[in-house]
Amino acid sequence: MQTKSKNKVSNLLRREAERRGATVLPYAPEEIYIDPCNACDLRCTFCPQSNWGSRKRGLMSEELFLKAIEEAASLRPRRINLFCYGESLLHKKISDMVRLATDKGLWVRIHTNAKTLNAEKAKKLIESGLSEIRFSFDTADKEIYNKLRVRSDFDVVLKNIHEFIRIKQELGAGNPVVNLQEMIPYQPGKAACNTDKYKALFKGCDVNFTARHLHNFAGASKEKEFATHESTGSSPCRQLYKRLVVTFDGKIHACCLDAEGFNIIGDLSKGDTIASSWNSEAMQRLRHLTYTHQLDGLKPCDSCDQLRQNRKPMSLKKRLLASILWKSAAGKKK
């Protein structure tokens, strides 16, 4: 993974790009999603999987994955996310994919619901060199969990997560870093914080905890309790300045919230590259429209709550540093 200082530089460059409303970026994406499988075994109430439209589901071929990971590695992103719209553990070659990516010196993260994470899969993932794993284990409340995560089972998933942690310890492995994500019902003006009840489920375990309010998946979420944010203003789309998605069939989505593929900016199967798609005409247009908030008819952006939240501005010191970094990066791009 990049050093903290490099990450800070990346963050400042991105914030400056957002502030300027830049359409052509002098830096590569910080994160690249490569989605091995856009199918899922669950039908969570808050997820686009529960009201999927015309987009077909499938598994990424080995040939396409090799092409995607070669291109991604050449851009040296902060991390590779081997997931996006589906459940990656449904792909039988997922551990091999992780190994191919980590062998190139990439920081590789998987986000999983852990429903099918048995001991064999756990051992293979740990031994593959996986850098980070995040478990979508939303709440310590069994009833709420089973209501939100349709087709899942609170007890089974909790057991699977503990088994994964045990196997990692047994193997003496430093990685993957284990993150547990708790979802907190949205309350205006209140930050999301982990509950004591949630932390108690993993007492004594070597894990990191995160808490967040669930966004509305660009209007695709139907879970009102967890995904209703009040509009507090407007902001540029952070997604378009930070990351993109390579789907199982090679199409490149501009945004990780665009499960339907309304905004496809490239296609690896048709000769496009990740690098060329990052600053393609289609991507430049999206950056301009979202920065200027010309959202009418622009799906799924017209329904996305992420564009209707005020962001805390950078301090003057950071603004000045970001401006210097931007001029330097832009000059090198030329």
Image: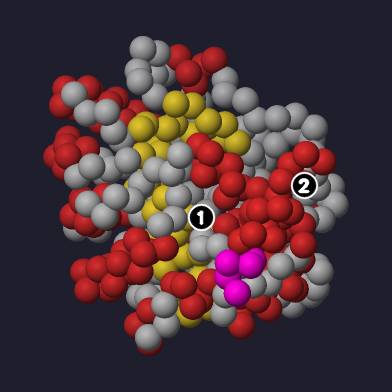
Q: Nearer the viewer, mark 1 or mark 2?
A: 2
Q: Position of residue 49 (x, y in %)?
A: 47, 60
Q: Position of residue 166 (x, y in %)?
A: 23, 23
Residue 36 appears in the picture as rendered: yes
Q: Quadrant of residue 192?
A: top right
Q: Amino acid at mark 2?
A: Leu
Q: Residue at x 53, y 44 (%)?
A: 7
Q: Quadrant of residue 254?
A: bottom right
Residue carrying label 1? 30
Q: Amino acid at mark 1?
A: Glu
Q: Nearer the viewer, residue 257 or 171?
A: 171
Disc 2 element: helix
Q: Residue at x 45, y 39 (%)?
A: 3
Image quadrant containing the N terminus: top left
Q: Nearer the viewer, residue 37 or 287?
A: 287
Residue carrying label 2? 320
In this picture, which residue range is highlighted in magenta? 330-334
